[in-house]
Image (cartoon, helix red, strand yellow):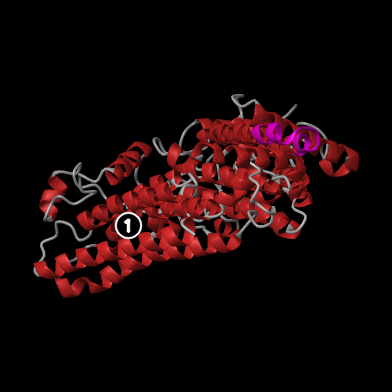
């Protein structure tokens, strides 16, 4: 008696490594009941929570599909699609662009690798990837030719967007906090969506659309850099800007200008150093023009951000 | 119909028994947020439920919207928006990194881990009401900062029991850090005190300051 049988089955399955009934199933399917449980037994065994009760009732519907939830069952975790997937992982084939699994190849880095890349972005003396000028050298020295990742463009950009929207009104916040006499009202240092929206549009547009422009211009210069590589470069280039923005918490205008200026100088140098790097370029002058263009665009972004969010 | 291996049908029990069982579960999980390190964290993550997150987020939203007198409805909806959109983003990030976690598990996890922030917002309410302004400011900051740290540690504890590939726990945890910081910032913004009520106190200090400044120039 007691919660013995159904949960003992599930625990045994969980502890025995990769089995057809995994520990954590996406969403609505219940992992606590193994696939061999009958519907009657599923209804009879009651769990401690309403969610697991509901899940056990749905477990019967998913009983046939539990076999596909092996190591490859990492697709979209939201609800309904797990019921529809009845095929084995091998039969699903190569991941397509619209499936989440396709982008997992770009998230294949550990925390220490990520931190090292951020460090090389803040102190740009080493290229972020691609010392090799051809694929044979690239495969021969994998440590010096790491794969690009999409984690940095997404999360460094998001961090910068949140920082900018917070710091935009931080002068008012501090004035209210330290009750300086020229802060009139509490007013709108509260939740300000406009700054967040503006920062998000600018930053996400910059990090993902400017590499698109370069990608489109590539055939003219005879360069063949994958789109993701350029996006990765632009993502990591925001690391010095984030550090500079943190310094800009200080409400003195001169400090803010110096900090943002330094941050964007380092960031522009990083971008120019890494965009279209070390490819066998037929039209060298076009490549140099592209690097110059990327530098100018980055400096323009720096001016826009500084005068929109910090210096008023 | 036969009884199950461990008891009766739950459909036959009284409403009070069902309610009290769920309340006991929610209370137990809230306690787990404060005292992690017990054995069955993975089981807690697996059996997700939404009562606890609903109660916690609703309380936090009510507290913050009561404080924000002019933008109350905006603040109320923003709390729920942050929790649900944040959970979706954390789930997608964890799945891209190779973890096997689902959306509702993340909602349950993050909802429970907001509990220290709920306590800190209640404390901020008490501080604003009973303490002097400068002491209240310091205490608000320290309490919110401490609760952000505790929430992050609790969420990290739960996530480390989920199936995240080695070396990627920090990467999966970083959006959670941003999530708690944004909720903490919302709390700090919501509990700013009004300037007008403090005007008479700052008057003499300003007068003394302006009288002191011409003397070095003279």
Q: In which quarter of the image is residue A295?
A: bottom left
Q: In this view, does B189 lie above or below A1?
A: below
Asked whether residue A24 is in view, the answer is yes
Q: Position of residue B197 (x, y in %)?
A: 78, 46
Q: Which residue lies furthest to the front in this view?
A: B218
Q: Name the residue under label 1.
A: A234
Q: Does the magenta stretch include residue A120?
A: no
Q: Where is residue B81 in the image (x, y as percent from the top left)?
A: 64, 56
Where is the N terminus of chain A found, in terms of image quarters?
Answer: top right
Name the residue located 82 percent from the left edge and 41 percent from the top edge: B10
What subunit carries mark 1? A
Asked whether residue A21 is in view, the answer is no
Q: Is residue B132 magenta?
A: yes
Name the residue located 52 percent from the left edge and 51 percent from the top edge: A167
Q: In this view, does A266 lie to the left or right of A38?
A: left
The one nearer the camera, B80 or A173, is A173
The one nearer the camera, B190 or B111, is B190
Q: Quadrant of residue A83?
A: bottom right
Name the residue located 77 percent from the left edge and 31 percent from the top edge: B6
Secondary structure of the residue carrying numbered label 1 = helix
Q: Where is residue B143 in the image (x, y as percent from the top left)?
A: 65, 32
Count the labels in the image.
1
Q: Is residue A311 above or below residue B13?
A: below
> Looking at the magenta stretch, what is its main secondary structure?
helix
Which region of the structure is painted magenta? B125-138
Mark 1: few, some, or many residues within 10 Å (few <14, many ≥20)?
many
Q: In this view, does A226 lie above or below B82?
A: below
The one nearer the camera, B90 or B9, is B90
Name the residue located 20 percent from the left edge and 63 percent from the top edge: A291
Q: Position of residue A69 (x, y in %)?
A: 50, 48
Q: Is residue A11 left or right of residue A48?
A: left
């Amino acid at each position: 008696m007691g919660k013995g049988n159904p949960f003992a089955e599930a625990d045994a399955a969980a502890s025995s490594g990769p089995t057809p009934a995994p520990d954590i199933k996406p969403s609505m399917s219940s992992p606590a009941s193994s696939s061999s449980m009958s519907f009657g037994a599923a209804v009879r065994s009651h769990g401690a929570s309403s969610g697991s009760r509901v899940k056990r009732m749905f477990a019967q519907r998913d009983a046939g599909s539990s076999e596909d939830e092996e190591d490859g069952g990492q697709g979209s975790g939201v609800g309904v699609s797990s019921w529809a997937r009845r095929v084995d992982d091998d039969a699903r084939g190569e991941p397509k662009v619209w499936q989440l699994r396709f982008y997992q190849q770009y998230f294949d880095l550990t925390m220490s690798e990520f931190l090292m890349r951020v460090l090389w972005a803040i102190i740009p003396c080493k290229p972020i990837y691609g010392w090799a000028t051809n694929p044979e050298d690239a495969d021969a020295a994998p440590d010096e030719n790491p794969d690009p990742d999409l984690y940095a463009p997404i999360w460094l950009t998001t961090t910068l967007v949140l920082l900018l929207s917070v710091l935009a009104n931080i002068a008012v916040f501090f004035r209210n906090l330290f009750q300086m006499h020229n802060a009139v009202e509490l007013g709108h240092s509260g939740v300000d969506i406009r700054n967040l929206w503006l920062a998000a549009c600018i930053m996400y547009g910059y990090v993902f659309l400017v590499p698109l422009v370069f990608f489109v211009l590539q055939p003219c210069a005879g360069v063949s850099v994958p789109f993701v590589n350029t996006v990765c470069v632009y993502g990591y280039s925001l690391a010095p800007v984030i550090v500079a923005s943190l310094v800009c918490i200080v409400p003195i205008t001169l400090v803010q200008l110096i900090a943002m200026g330094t941050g964007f100088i380092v960031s522009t140098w990083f971008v120019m150093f890494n965009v279209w790097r070390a490819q066998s370029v037929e039209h060298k002058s076009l490549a140099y023009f592209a690097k110059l263009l990327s530098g100018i665009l980055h400096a323009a972004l720096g001016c826009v951000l500084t005068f929109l969010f910090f210096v008023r | 119909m036969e009884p199950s291996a461990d008891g009766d049908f739950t459909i036959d029990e009284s409403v009070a028994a069902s309610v009290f069982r769920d309340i006991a579960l929610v209370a137990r999980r809230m306690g787990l947020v404060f005292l992690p390190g017990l054995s069955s964290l993975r089981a807690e993550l697996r059996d997700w439920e939404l009562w606890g997150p609903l109660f916690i987020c609703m309380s936090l939203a009510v507290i913050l919207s009561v404080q924000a007198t002019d933008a109350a409805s905006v603040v109320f909806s923003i709390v729920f928006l942050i929790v649900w959109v944040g959970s979706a983003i954390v789930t997608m990030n964890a799945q891209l990194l190779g973890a096997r976690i689902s959306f509702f598990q993340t909602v349950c996890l993050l909802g429970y881990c907001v509990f220290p922030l709920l306590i800190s917002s209640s404390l901020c309410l008490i501080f604003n009401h009973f303490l002097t302004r400068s002491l209240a400011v310091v205490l608000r900051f320290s309490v919110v900062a401490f609760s952000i740290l505790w929430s992050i540690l609790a969420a990290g504890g739960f996530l480390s029991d989920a199936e995240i590939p080695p070396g990627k726990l920090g990467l999966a945890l970083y959006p959670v850090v941003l999530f708690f910081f944004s909720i903490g910032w919302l709390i700090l913004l919501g509990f700013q005190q009004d300037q007008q009520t403090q005007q008479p106190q700052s008057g003499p200090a300003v007068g003394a300051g302006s009288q002191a400044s011409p003397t070095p120039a003279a």
